[in-house]
Image (tube, rainbow, N blue to C red):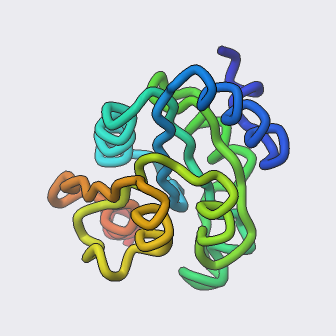
């Protein structure tokens, strides 16, 4: 699948997911900023994909990232972050959302599996109750230790001090 056809608006995504559901395919959803992609992101997304057949990534828009992480972020703009995600073999669809959290998106998609990093306790995972109440499951995936976008930024800053 071409990367541009993977980056999709919600209305079109919901139509595609409806067809996949009729085929009995398990829909997995995760979300995040995915600002400076690194091995931790790739391993996380591959592990998420392994929980079902179709992996949908909800990508925080630039506006959303600003709200959550402050005005200096994101480093990479949303269209480029979406294209990089869509280029990964394990990602089937990427859709961008503007809200500070993905609850509306999760309620629209109704995933069979909601995935977040193990750094999130289950009772703090947005949409966990909704997914479980609709017969789905919540999966927490261990993160790769000592790698994060913030740690990469710090390393770069130290190099140029």
Residue at point 39%, 33% (across, down)? 52
The quadrant where residue 83 appears: top right
In-image side of 103 versus 120 (left or right): right
**Identity of the residue furthest to the left in this view:** 145
In-image side of 15 versus 65 (left or right): right
In-image side of 122 versus 105 (left or right): left
In this rendering, does residue 12 appear at all?
A: yes
In this rendering, does residue 77 appear at all?
A: no
Viewer-side residue, 110 vs 86: 110
Task: Judge whether 157 appears above or below 2 on screen.
Answer: below
Q: Position of residue 32 (x, y in %)?
A: 51, 60
Q: Position of residue 125 (x, y in %)?
A: 39, 74
In-image side of 8 versus 144 (left or right): right
Q: Position of residue 145 (x, y in %)?
A: 15, 57
Task: Judge whether 40 appears above or below 54 on screen.
Answer: below
Task: Judge whether 118 appears above or below 77 on screen.
Answer: below
Viewer-side residue, 125 vs 151: 125
Quadrant holding the N terminus: top right
Q: Position of residue 90 (x, y in %)?
A: 45, 28
Residue at point 47%, 74% (across, down)? 126
The quadrant where residue 149 appears: bottom left
Residue at point 34%, 34% (across, down)? 46
Residue at point 23%, 64% (across, down)? 118
Quadrant holding the C terminus: bottom left
All told, the count of numbered labels is: 0
């Amino acid at each position: 699948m071409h990367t541009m056809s993977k980056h999709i608006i919600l209305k079109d995504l919901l139509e595609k997911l409806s067809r996949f559901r009729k085929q009995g395919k398990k829909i997995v959803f995760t979300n995040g900023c995915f600002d400076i992609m690194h091995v931790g992101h790739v391993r996380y997304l591959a592990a998420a994909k392994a929980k079902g057949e179709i992996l949908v990534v909800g990508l925080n828009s630039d506006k959303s990232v600003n709200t959550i992480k402050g005005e200096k972020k994101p480093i990479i703009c949303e269209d480029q972050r979406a294209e990089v995600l869509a280029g990964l073999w394990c990602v089937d669809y990427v859709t961008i959302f503007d809200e500070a959290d993905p609850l509306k998106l999760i309620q629209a998609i109704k995933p069979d599996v909601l995935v977040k990093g193990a750094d999130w306790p289950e009772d703090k995972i947005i949409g966990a109750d909704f997914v479980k109440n609709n017969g789905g499951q919540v999966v927490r995936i261990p993160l790769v230790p000592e790698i994060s976008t913030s740690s990469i930024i710090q390393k770069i800053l130290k190099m140029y001090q």
